[in-house]
Image: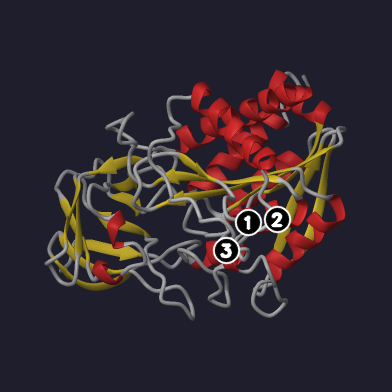
Amino acid sequence: MTSLFIDAAFDSGNIDVLSIDGRTARLAIRRDKDSEFFQWFHFRVAASAGEEVVLKITGLNASAYPGGWPDYDACVSEDRDYWARAASSFDKDEEGGTLTIRYLPASDLFWCAYFAPFSMERHHDLVADAASCEGVDYVRLGTTLDGQPVDCLEMGEGTTQVWLYARQHPGETQAEWWMEGALECLTDPADPVARGLRKHCRIHIVPNCNPDGSRRGHLRTNAAGTNLNREWAVPTPEKSPEVLAIRNRMDQTGVDFAMDVHADEAIPAVFLAGFEGIPSWTEAQGEGYYRYQRILDRRTPDFQTKLGYPKAAAGKANLSMSTNQLAERFGAVAMTLEMPYKDLADFPEPEQGFSPERCKLLGRECLAALLEWLEGAAQ
């Protein structure tokens, strides 16, 4: 009789069980609906405490970003609150690329995920908590294909229009942990960063741009199999109602500063990507982005500028991506923030790696950098 049980039939769950032999399981990740993307996993393991469990996730050479698996350790939790790392190894020659996760459970139940999950229930708690705070307005921007609301929180008395939005790619849960940290800062009436920003800005926050993909356990797409961050030039109600709803609201408010919050599978660093290559690029607009990047680099050792994406050549920016579209459409200082699944190469923390706690702290640091950026521009 087996002593190992694996389940994923819950919010953001994703795994298929191929076989179980004693304390070893062979597994595979399901593809996003109507898409070839797969990389996100999240499942529960029932196994008696005190004896090692071996989990082999197979077929990963065909995953969305196979470069993400070397030097990656899976996230594990026994209480779904504190997430540590389990020793993991990747062999590209075993069963089409296999990640082997080894874990010695202290109790009879644990959870395993690509990164610490951020459930839709936690999302609703986050939105409810923020919306109940003084000075915060809730705006229901639209409805997803699965019938979920696209939530937006707005606050501040200033004229600078700031947009912060996250989780276009639902498996990048780091982004909503970042949002939780940012919202905790912004709704704290005693926080000086929040007070300064709310004085200078009108802030618009979309904590989760892709509720359907989040609940379905997708890596990168919505319920139609659409990558939302390739829809910003011509969003449609049929394929990308989430982007259409968000962009329509942006057209109403305008955008001066925008940050699109993401995570990168392969690069072991926190970094920013800008809008080089847009047709209307000016040195002044570009310097606004570079100045923010310099401020953030100075403020926190979790951020760096050595690793990142290559810059687009002049006139070659992809305007279907939100950062490029908003920079071109509004003349905004726009950027994409990327956080890692792996630990930071130059600032590692062996127990948890890059963690929800660090995501939340980074959220506040990004806001503090924004306040400094705004005050510098006013001088």
Q: How many marks?
A: 3
Q: Which residue is mark 3?
A: 318
The answer to whether mark 1 and mark 3 are in CB contact below 8 A is no
Quarter of the image that includes the N terminus: bottom left
Mark closest to the chain's N terminus, 1 or 2:
1
Mark 2 packing: few (<14 Cα in 10 Å), some, or many (20+)?
many
Q: Residue 251 at x, y = what percent?
A: 82, 58
Relative to residue 57, is residue 182 drawn left or right? right
Q: Name the kind of residue labelled 3 in the image.
A: Asn
- Which of pointers 2 and 3 lies earlier in the amino acid sequence? 3
Earlier-in-chain disc, 1 versus 3: 1
> Which of these two is toward me, 2 or 303?
303
Residue nearer the viewer, 244 or 335: 335
What amino acid is found at the position of numbered circle 1 in the picture?
Ile
Residue that appears at 49% across and 27% down: 297
Residue identifier under label 2: 328
Q: Along the horizontal axis of the image, is 27 left or right of 336?
A: left
Secondary element type, mark 3: loop
Is residue 282 visible from the viewing direction of this image? yes
Name the residue carrying label 1: 278
SS at circle 1 = loop
> Mark 1 near mark 2, Cβ–Cβ under 8 Å?
yes
